[in-house]
């Protein structure tokens, strides 16, 4: 019984670690930002769309940084 409980706790902790890494991974957002700028430069999206999408990505990056900062201060 304890082995099952310990195993479930371990699994839950590992899943939480993976989810946390995924949520705080800036590299994917930086790549997305680069892709959006590239789309604009090759005339695949308008300047208006660029500004909108950049704003969304930058907001998500800021949220990640605030989340990381909060974790460090706890």
Image (cartoon, rainbow, N blue to C red):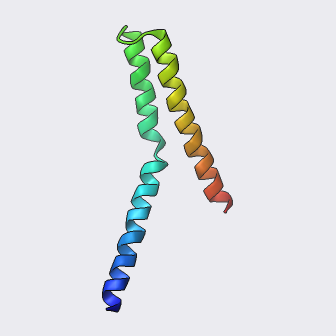
Q: Residue at x 41, y 13 (%)?
A: 40
Instruction: Judge whether 74 appears above or below 30 on screen.
Output: below
Q: Please state the total of marks drawn on the protein image.
A: 0
Q: Residue at x 65, y 54 (%)?
A: 70
Q: Quadrant of the C terminus?
A: bottom right
Q: Position of residue 25 (x, y in %)?
A: 46, 46
Farthest-out residue, right: 73
Q: Position of residue 29 (x, y in %)?
A: 45, 35
Q: Quadrant of residue 35?
A: top left
Q: Residue at x 38, y 64 (%)?
A: 15
Q: Position of residue 60 (x, y in %)?
A: 53, 37
Q: Residue at x 44, y 19 (%)?
A: 37
Q: Quadrant of residue 11?
A: bottom left
Q: Quadrant of the N terminus?
A: bottom left
Instruction: Judge whether 67 appears above or below 12 on screen.
Output: above
């Amino acid at each position: 019984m304890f082995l099952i409980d310990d195993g479930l706790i371990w699994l839950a902790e590992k899943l939480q670690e993976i989810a946390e890494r995924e949520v705080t991974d800036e590299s994917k957002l930086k790549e997305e930002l680069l892709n959006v700028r590239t789309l604009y430069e090759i005339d695949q999206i308008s300047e208006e769309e660029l500004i909108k999408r950049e704003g969304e990505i930058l907001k998500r990056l800021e949220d990640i940084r605030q989340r990381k900062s909060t974790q460090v201060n706890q």
